[in-house]
Amino acid sequence: MRLALIERHGTEILGSASIDSLHEALAGAARDMGFDRFALSLEIGRGVECGTSVLIHDYPPGWADIYVSFNLAETDPVIRASEQSLLTFRWAQLPKMVPMTRDEILTFEMGQRHGLADGLSVPRHLPGSMTGCCTFAVGADTPMPNDNIVVADALGAAA
């Protein structure tokens, strides 16, 4: 079952020819794995060469508006942890991974109030040129699909 999910959704993700088709592929993968939401963020270029940011997600619109309007990426502990990790991690691991500032704790708690209760983040880095993270999240009423963590790791890396 898990290998079939990786094969089916991996092919869709890797074959996406547009942002819209990638969005659709990631949303379908998230649902089939047992997650409620996904987000894919990429920073292409680093330092003075930084040029392009990409954010594809199906997070609740209210949260997305707040996140972008207030540039909360700067105080998002998930982003900071993903920049410092090569391994997939659960949000519950954040306090052990990065010391969280008061602002980061508030940002994280605000996301929880908007329906992002728990998540799994898959960071990927191409040194000097790109850093990215694919996250799959669940709401308060959805249990973390622990049986599909390996699937989420594979599909997040493909994205």
Image: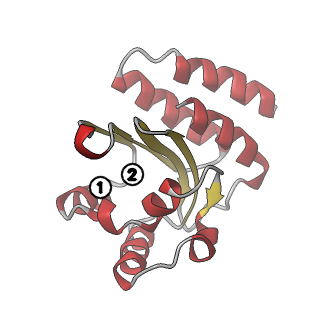
Looking at the picture, tell me which residue is in the foreground, 57 or 61.
57
Q: Which residue is mark 2?
A: 59
The three-letter amino acid code for the residue at tag 2 is Tyr
Residue 22 on image: x %, y %: 44, 26
Disc 2 and disc 1: Cα gap in Å? 6 Å
Q: Which residue is mark 1?
A: 64
Element under disc 1: helix
Q: Quadrant of residue 28?
A: top right
Please name the residue shown 54% across and 55% down the image: 137
Residue 67 on image: x %, y %: 28, 60
**Total of numbered circles in the picture?**
2
**Do the residues under discs 2 and 1 have CB atoms within 8 angstroms?**
yes
Residue 129 on image: x %, y %: 40, 35
The three-letter amino acid code for the residue at tag 1 is Ala
Name the mark on residue 154. Answer: none
Please name the residue shown 58% across and 77% down the image: 95
Q: Quadrant of the N terminus?
A: top right
Element under disc 2: loop
Residue 131 on image: x %, y %: 44, 42
In the depicted structure, whether residue 50 falls above or below residue 120: above
Looking at the picture, tell me which residue is in the foreground, 90 or 110.
90
In the depicted structure, whether residue 78 falls above or below residue 109: above
Looking at the picture, tell me which residue is in the foreground, 44 or 122.
44
- Tell me which label, 2 or 1, sits earlier in the chain: 2
Looking at the picture, tell me which residue is in the foreground, 98 or 46.
46
Local packing at callout 2 (Cα closer than 10 Å; few below 14, some 14-19, many 20+) is some
Question: In the rendered view, does 43 fall on the left or right side of 33?
Answer: left
